[in-house]
Image (tube, helix red, strand yellow):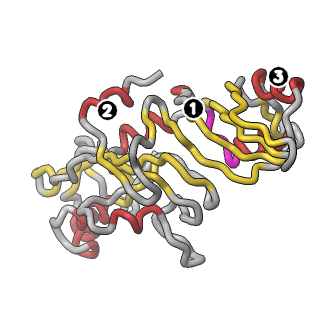
């Protein structure tokens, strides 16, 4: 769940500076979902109903974008190492967007960017099992037994992954590598890389090509398009 400090939300709505917003909160002039809030640092989400002096504040209109993330870009709003972030590609838009989930620094492909907290929380919740399709270039050649292990769910640390769909796209025996499509429904840290590592193969290159029903279409690396209302509605009902 994406949460922000109440005073920040008030300030970004143009009601007052952050310092004045803190004073308003301390004076009991702010409500969240009908309850007076006086504690500074209280965090709210996108769907909290907030009033100041009885008047509801205007929140940003909701927008979701399909982004073709390049390799060498961090899936965060800020990076303490000074690396380029996904947010840098959306600086010209008047919305505060954040990624739904993450792609590794060296992984390219489909990433959703949004300011819709409900959608983000829905898609990132483990129970929703959104299908994600990756294409990996791996070292070595998968054996039938290793493919079977991936299909039935390999064990990572103490957790057994859910069964995955596996499709070998290309095998280069001369260079001793393979291109493999892997479809998973979870979102563990470095999951695809760790799944291949569990069957003794190193991922040399990785891209996410599909998320639920969405694909990269004709996008090129570093570009994006906004999702239609129909696409957002489909995402909210995906299973």
Of the two numbered discs 2 and 1 in the rendering, the one whose residue sits closer to the viewer: 2
- Sequence-first disc among 2 and 1: 1
- Residue interval drawn in magenta: 186-191
- Residue 109: x and y in percent read 53, 49
* Residue 42 visible to an observer of this rendering: no
In the rendered image, which residue does mark 2 sit on?
231
**Circle 3: element type:** helix
Of the image marks 2 and 3, the number of the one nearer the N terminus: 3
Q: Nearer the viewer, residue 30 or 83?
A: 83
Q: Which mark is residue 148?
A: 3
Q: Against 60, is 154 above or below?
A: above
Question: Label 3 crowding class (10 Å Cα cut-off): few <14, some 14-19, many 20+?
Answer: some
Magenta segment includes 124: no
Label 2 residue SS: helix
User: Mark 2 to mark 3: distance in Å?
Assistant: 34 Å
User: Residue 126 shows which numbered tag?
Assistant: 1
């Amino acid at each position: 769940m994406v949460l922000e400090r109440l005073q920040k939300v008030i300030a970004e709505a143009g009601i007052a500076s952050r310092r004045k917003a803190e004073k308003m909160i301390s004076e009991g002039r702010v409500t969240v979902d009908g309850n007076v809030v006086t504690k500074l640092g209280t965090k709210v989400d996108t769907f909290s109903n907030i009033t100041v002096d009885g008047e509801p504040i205007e929140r940003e209109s909701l927008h979701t974008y399909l982004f073709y993330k390049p390799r060498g870009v961090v899936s965060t709003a800020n990076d303490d190492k000074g690396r380029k972030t996904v947010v840098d590609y959306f600086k010209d838009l008047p919305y505060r967007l954040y990624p739904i989930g993450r792609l590794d620094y060296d992984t390219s492909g489909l990433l959703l960017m949004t300011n819709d907290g409900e959608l983000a929380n829905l898609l990132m919740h483990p129970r929703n099992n959104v299908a994600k399709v990756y294409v990996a270039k791996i070292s070595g050649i998968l054996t039938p037994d290793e493919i079977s292990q991936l299909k039935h769910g390999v064990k990572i640390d103490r957790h057994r992954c859910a069964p995955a769909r596996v499709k070998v796209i290309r095998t280069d025996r001369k260079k001793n590598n393979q291109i493999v499509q892997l479809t998973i429904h979870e979102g563990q840290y470095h999951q695809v890389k760790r799944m291949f590592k569990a069957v003794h193969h190193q991922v040399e290159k990785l891209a996410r090509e599909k998320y639920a029903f969405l694909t990269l279409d004709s996008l090129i690396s570093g570009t994006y398009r906004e999702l239609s209302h129909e696409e957002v509605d489909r995402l909210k009902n995906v299973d």
